[in-house]
Amino acid sequence: MVEGNAGVFRSEDFGNNWDYVWNRITPRYSRPMCIDSRVPFSLTVASAPTAFSSFKDEGGAQAMLFRSDNEGRDWRSLCDKKHSPSAANFHGLTVDPDEIGGVLVGTDTGEVWSVSKEATWTLVAEGMPAVLSIFAGEEALSEKVKSVT
């Protein structure tokens, strides 16, 4: 396997130089990704064997979801038994405004899942066309803060 031609890269000098940080992660094709702006600033990345992996492929998309809490130095799977690997491919991915370290994931099978920092998957919506993007606005976070104060 050739490292460095697919995956995640990091720059520590404002983009002048880049380091490959996706070592030994499979599948290697990475897209989408999101960064939680709250400590510990988790980077969550969805990956699949190719850019065109699909639930329609023999054996499904074989997609995985990984997170790093230390700028890509270490990675851990966020997949549960059903999604390890996932038959559905992950297209939409955003930070869950209701849980630090949690994400919302949209699939090519028309589902949206909430995935906790402990890798607990909860189905949020289904029966839609492929979910290519998700917007979870600050309003959800603001409403939660209002109810606590």
Image (cartoon, rainbow, N blue to C red):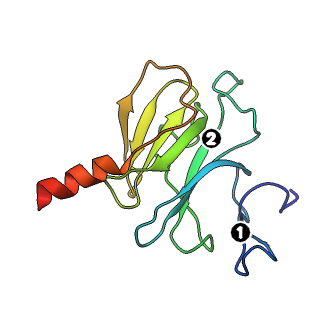
Q: Amino acid at mark 2?
A: Ala
- Percent of width and height locating residue 109: 54, 24
Residue shown at 58% from the left, 33% from the top: 132
In the drawing, what numbered circle is on residue 78?
none
Q: Quadrant for residue 6, please give it.
A: bottom right
- Percent of width and height locating residue 58: 71, 24
Q: Quadrant for residue 22, please give it.
A: bottom right
Q: Residue under circle 1?
A: 21
- Percent of width and height locating residue 82: 48, 37
Could you classify mark 2 by the number of other residues whose Cα lies within 10 Å: few (under 14), some (14-19), or many (20 or more)?
many
- Percent of width and height locating residue 149: 11, 62
Q: Residue under circle 2?
A: 63
Residue shown at 49% from the left, 53% from the top: 78
User: In the displayed structure, does residue 139 sit left or right of residue 42?
Assistant: left
User: In the displayed structure, does residue 47 sit left or right of residue 96?
Assistant: right
Front residue (pair 140, 88) = 140
Query: Where 42 falls versus 90 (above or below)?
Result: below
Q: Amino acid at mark 1?
A: Val
Residue shown at 58% from the left, 38% from the top: 90
User: In the displayed structure, does residue 42 sit left or right of residue 88?
Assistant: left
- In the rendered image, the quadrant that contains the N terminus is bottom right
Query: Where 79 falls versus 51 (above or below)?
Result: below
SS type, badge 2: loop
Mark closer to the observer (2, 1): 1
